[in-house]
Amino acid sequence: MSTTILEARELRCSLKQAARKDAFSFTLQAGRMLFVAGPPDSGKGALVRVLAGLQLPVSGRVRAEGTRGGVLRGCEPPLPTTVAQALALQQAAAPGFDPEPAKALLEEMHIHPGQRFSALSGCERYWVLLALAVAARPRLLVLENPAAVLGPGEVQGVLALARCLAAEHGSAVALTGEEMTAAAAADDLMILARGKLMLHLPVEALHSEVWEVEYPDGQRYATANGSRVLAANWHNGRRVAWVHCPEGREAMQKTLCEGAAVRPVGLQQLYWALTGALSADAMDGVL
């Protein structure tokens, strides 16, 4: 039986969510990686700060097991003059800190312990902060949009390192981004838009539970057999809806009108649909 590392209940992380009453609940299990996707105004920044314990939610509660650590923009700790001094301070402050993996990672990235922080690039500074966080072996590692600082190849290196922490030490990982390439490496996917949780499901369930449905003229979308319309829009004059049906395609098709076309959805296409399309509620008076 897996261990719950983090449990969020009726969570609202921003005043925008509180005003709209958009609360949501979820859990994060040991050994799993959660990718939180959304545009800049989606509320994912506030969410990861709440998950990391750096900010209190507007309402709701978060229960986390063990220590939390990570790399978040604008939340860098006061750092000493050199990289070596940072390692020494972290080792003294964090129980269980193992300096050897941190030193090995920094050596791999060609960052010398004697280098001054003032001489480091933004990318190098990120790797130092990541090395300090990972070497402390937190139960929850939170990473805010590494693609904003690192190149695509380096982001893959970060994901591999986070995956190793999850596999070897049973940690959970939560990371954010605006590009869906990182989602393929995650276990769970969460998409936020305008402060609202649009979708939360295991990545492996995407191709069996989420579909794009194109409706003939004059027909409305329908929800049945446990299905839910996530978003809807117009495409070439036809009504299109993105539907989540945990029971699978066959169960969903029983609710569709004649002539409706059902198509699978890719990760990037789903992101664009849920963050750029109108919500199903907003389309209710149109479709």
Image (cartoon, rainbow, N blue to C red):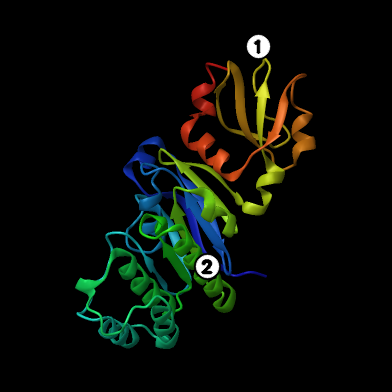
The C terminus: image quadrant: top right
Which element is circle 1 on?
A: loop
Which disc, if any, is residue 218? 1
Q: Residue at x 22, y 78 (%)?
A: 116
The kind of residue on which mark 2 rests is: Ala
* Residue 157 in the figure: left or right of residue 217: left
Which element is circle 2 on?
A: strand
- As rendered, which of 252 and 187 lies closer to the eye? 187
Q: How far separated are the C-alphas under marks 2 and 1?
A: 47 Å
Q: Which residue is mark 2?
A: 172
From what the image shows, is residue 31 above or below residue 283? Answer: below
The kind of residue on which mark 1 rests is: Gly
Pinpoint residue 247: horizontal percent, then vertical percent.
74, 42
Pinpoint residue 236: horizontal percent, then vertical percent.
58, 18
The N terminus: image quadrant: bottom right
From what the image shows, is residue 109 above or below residue 275? Answer: below
Q: Is residue 222 visible?
A: no
